[in-house]
Image (cartoon, rainbow, N blue to C red):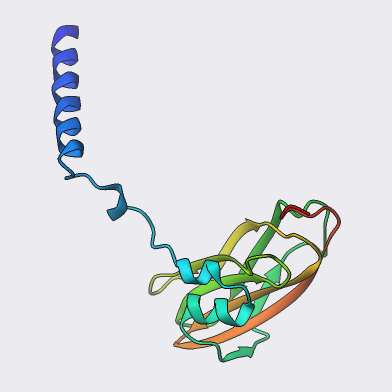
């Protein structure tokens, strides 16, 4: 019984190795899309344009940002963004004084609740700006977060 299991495993591994060597299994096809221009932008307006396709943003009270008022360590700042808006397509987080303002961006599927939770890195005290794309329009909310120890090389 052990011999048969060994032979089956060896044959399966060989087939996968040949398929990978022939280029039939390409990891690029399974990786998430990378918005390179958005992460290379140096200003918030350029980042919003590159990540979400528009720069006309309206402030909204329907976006809730849950984050600490004072972050003891800027390397790990927990953030939760939620909204009750209908038709939420994407949510992006920008940090004003970071070297790269776009901290994260999420594309949501249809009929998905407008909610994300993550951890971001902040270099120093600044505004955290949440931008929600809902039904083709952009809405934002911001919160000032005071950082005592910088996480972006500061």
Percent coordinates x, y for residue 121 in the rendering: 68, 57
Along the horizontal axis of the image, is 32 left or right of 82? left
Percent coordinates x, y for residue 18 in the rendering: 15, 33
Q: Tally the numbered discs.
A: 0
Percent coordinates x, y for residue 45 in the rendering: 60, 82
Q: In the rendered view of the protein, which quadrant contains the C terminus? A: bottom right
Above-or-below relation of 23 to 49:
above
Comparing 84 with 21, the one in front is: 21
From this viewpoint, is residue 28 visible?
Answer: yes
Comparing 115 with 154, the one in front is: 154
Along the horizontal axis of the image, is 111 left or right of 17? right
In which quadrant of the rendered view does residue 64 lie?
bottom right
Along the horizontal axis of the image, is 12 left or right of 79? left
Q: In the rendered view of the protein, which quadrant contains the N terminus? A: top left
Along the horizontal axis of the image, is 67 left or right of 23? right
From this viewpoint, is residue 84 visible?
Answer: no
Seen at 55% across and 87% down, the residue is: 55
In which quadrant of the rendered view does residue 147 lie?
bottom right
In which quadrant of the rendered view does residue 140 lie?
bottom right
Percent coordinates x, y for residue 141 in the rendering: 68, 80
Above-or-below relation of 12 to 75:
above
């Amino acid at each position: 019984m052990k011999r048969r299991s060994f032979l089956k495993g060896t044959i399966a591994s060989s087939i996968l190795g040949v398929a990978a060597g022939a280029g039939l299994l390409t990891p690029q096809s399974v990786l998430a899309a990378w918005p390179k221009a958005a992460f290379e932008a140096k200003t918030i307006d350029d980042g919003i344009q590159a990540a979400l396709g528009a720069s006309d943003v309206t402030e909204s009270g329907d976006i809730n940002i849950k984050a600490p008022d004072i972050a003891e360590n800027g390397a790990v700042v927990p953030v939760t963004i939620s909204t009750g808006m209908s038709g939420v397509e994407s949510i992006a987080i920008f940090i004003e004084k970071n070297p790269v303002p776009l901290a994260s961006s999420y594309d949501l599927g249809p009929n998905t609740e407008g909610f994300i939770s993550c951890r971001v890195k902040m270099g120093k005290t600044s505004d955290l700006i949440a931008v929600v794309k809902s039904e083709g329009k952009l809405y934002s909310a911001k919160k000032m977060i005071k950082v005592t120890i910088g996480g972006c090389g500061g």
